[in-house]
Amino acid sequence: MVRPRRVTTPVVGLSVLLVLSIVAWVGGDAVIDRLNAARCTNPATVLITAAPEVAPALTEAADGLDVTGDCYRVEIKAESARETTTRLVNGQESPSVWVPESTMWLRQARDSGAWRVPESGISVAQSPVVLAVKDPAKGKNWRELIGPGAKAVAGIADPAKDPASLSALLAMRGFASGEKDPAAATVASIRPVSADYAEQADDLFNRPLDVFPTSQQALNRHNSTPGATRLSAVVPENPVPPLDFPYVVLPDAGEQQRAGAEKFLARLRSGTNLDKFGLRVPDDKAVGLDQAFVDETLRVWAGLTLTARVLGVLDVSGSMNQIVPRTGTTRMALAVAAAERGLGLFKPGTQIGLWKFSTKLDGDKDYKEIIPFASVKEHLANGKAVAAVRATRATANGSTGLYDTTLAAYQEARKNWELGRINIVAIMTDGRNEDPDSISQQKLLEELGKLQDKRRPLPVIAIGMGPDVDVDELTKIAEATGGRAFTTVDPAGISDIFAQALSTMLCQPPACRPQ
């Protein structure tokens, strides 16, 4: 009889250890993941502000996250790049991640004062820029449609706000560079499309145009709209920058948000379904923006269109109540009439804001807003701005707080400087600084000097009227910013000198070169 062998305790122990080792080897990672998931009681929230064109695609990707497993969640907020830029420049609460429709917006945000925004990001989607064409017989390629000598009626949106229009403008300059006189060809090409450009890119679809630039996504969306006139897409024969939807983690993101943002970026780049949203997988070899060429092109555009951002500052000190000989009216009335006339010098898209100044108009401040910034078109349409200007009166006994006001106005204009426009501070006064509590002239000039940026010119136009003006004072202030001073002893000539000043600073090529 064979007796069964007795299994000893050490053998059993070794067997258990062997089994556990195999389990750990085969499924250890899964066990660890489960343990980690169980410990994730407070997942980080990554807030992403994205262009409306890409927000739905990001939302779908975020909805598919395993919040417990990854220990982070993503919230998507659709917002225009312009709105996000304004919030970042003003120092308001920022998202963890920003995904505008174009790298253009990152650089514009930096140029506007949000210097901590990265200059570039990682593309998470792409939409090519095309020309939308009603009648294909108008031309078979971009050169025939928008190049020098093109016969098609072309339109464009403001290239400082619309990346598709910027790409088209860059292409037009590229076509002109091959002509015998590139400068003349550039003007000849751009002037027709700049005559009545659209403030909003979507408006181009509703205009009687033969051709205009847009994104492939926007064109497809239009063509799929019931009842819409179907348009053809003409792709560029030479590469132009597409809408590249850069993904940038902003500097205020916390450590957990940054880690979650990086994981979500990896998810987006590994296979998000973009086709259903009219977008393409990003092409890292796509042509990018040459910033120097972009800046130069937008300055040419600004010179041709006279699009500007002007902060006007109007003296309302007591001396403005004086009657001007031979006119029967006050200096104030003449200045207001000149300011109103000045609106006619600008294109409808020019942005204008107006302050008044004396001493202690708003608490300890020597200045106060009359009308907020808005386009000339908006100001004239609602009538409120013109009424507010006409209602402006001089104070009874106020003095001239020129220095503090000039510095505050310049700081405000610098903070809200806009790429693609001629940015100006225009100060109109009938006297000299009379505020004993203000900074000194030397300190003002020093502060103005610190605020200079050759890439973002911001001249002061100083307009002085009457015998009490200190010409040397105004000249020093203006020249410290690259601007000019215009003065007249006779206040009755203020309207002419006002027009002369703005015309000089905003003249069009070839009579003068844009700054």
Image (cartoon, helix red, strand yellow):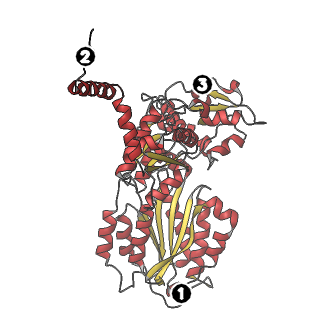
Residue in view at x 37 percent, y 35 percent: 31
Q: Relative to the observer, which residue lies in front, 18 or 470?
A: 18
Label 2 SS:
loop
Disc nearer the start of the sequence (2/1): 2
Q: Quickly name the residue at label 2.
A: 5
From mark 1 to mark 3, how far is it between C-alphas?
62 Å
- Identify the residue at the far top of this view: 1
Q: Relative to the observer, which residue lies in front, 30 or 81?
A: 30
Residue in view at x 54 percent, y 70 percent: 354
Q: Relative to the observer, which residue lies in front, 461 or 295?
A: 295
Q: Mark 2 belongs to which amino acid? A: Arg
Q: Relative to the observer, which residue lies in front, 478 or 472?
A: 478
- The percent position of residue 239, horizontal first and vertical second, equals 49, 27
From mark 2 to mark 1, how far is it between C-alphas?
114 Å
Depth check, mark 2 against mark 1: the one in front is: 2
Depth check, mark 2 against mark 3: the one in front is: 2
Q: Quickly name the residue at label 3.
A: 141
Q: Is residue 404 above or below residue 257?
A: below
Label 1 SS:
loop
The answer to whether residue 289 is visible is no
> Mark 2, residues whose alpha carbon is within 10 Å: few (<14), some, or many (≥20)?
few
Query: Where is residue 207, by image quadrant?
Result: top right
Q: Is residue 66 above or below residue 434?
A: above
- The percent position of residue 343, horizontal first and vertical second, equals 60, 64
- Identify the residue at the far right of this view: 227
In which quadrant of the rendered image does the N terminus lie? top left
Q: Would you say 382 lies left or right of 249 here?
A: right
- The percent position of residue 271, horizontal first and vertical second, equals 49, 29
- The percent position of residue 329, horizontal first and vertical second, equals 62, 83
Q: Mark 1 belongs to which amino acid? A: Thr
Which dot marks residue 395?
A: 1
